[in-house]
Structure formats: C-alpha cells, structure tokens
Image (tube, grey):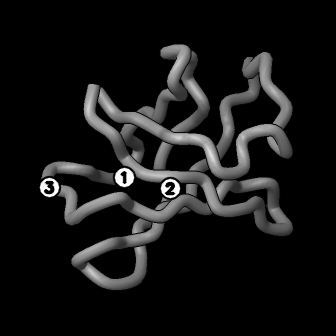
Amino acid sequence: MRRLGVILHTIHNGNLIARSATKLTNTALNTAVWNEQVKKIGKIVDIFGPVSRPYFSIKPSKKSDFKIHELKDKNLYVK
C-alpha cells in the first residue's frame, strides 16, 4: 500500500476532504481508500487543486465501522 495523504475535514454532504502528501501518479476516481488498520474508508470521488499536492474528496463506505469525526488528521492509503 502507498500513502495517499491526510484527512483534513468533512464537508456538508458527508464526504471527507484529504490532502495528498506528495505528487501522486496513477491515482484515479473510484480508487478505494484504506486506513492504517487496512480497513476500507471509502472511494475517491473527486480530485482537485494543484498537481503537486492535490486534494481528494472521498465518499465514505456505508459498511464502515468507524466514526467519521475520528478520522481527522489520520493517514490514508491506496493499494
């Protein structure tokens, strides 16, 4: 797994906003996102901002066993 970035906050529709740690290649929409415990958090639904360190909008999984407010400042990973 490789590090995607860090969750910054949630937005009004429940999506998570994360900032990339570095310039990423081969990261696309609908890519699954995982936490440090290798539990699926959700999938990328939007990529925006500067190419050098983009932001990601992540739609949380419906079957998640985590609380969204506890994810702030946590690392995210992609496979």
Above-or-below relation of 29 to 55: above
> Split into 4 quadrants, where in the image is the N terminus?
top left
Q: Callout 2, which amino acid?
A: Val
Q: Secondary structure at mark 3?
A: loop
**Residue sitting at x 47%, y 49%:** 44
Name the disc covering residue 45, or none.
2
How far apart are the alpha carbons under marks 1 and 3?
12 Å
Q: Position of residue 63 (x, y in %)?
A: 74, 18
Query: Which quadrant holds residue 10?
Result: bottom right
Q: Locate residue 4, reporting x and y percent.
A: 37, 47
- Three-letter code for the amino acid on which mark 1 is drawn: Leu
Which of 74 and 9 lies nearest the eye of the viewer?
A: 74
Q: Which residue is mark 3?
A: 25
Q: Report the residue marked by disc 1.
A: 29
Distance in Å between CA atoms under marks 2 and 1: 5 Å
Q: Residue lying furthest left in this view? A: 25
State the SS at label 2: strand
The mark total stands at 3
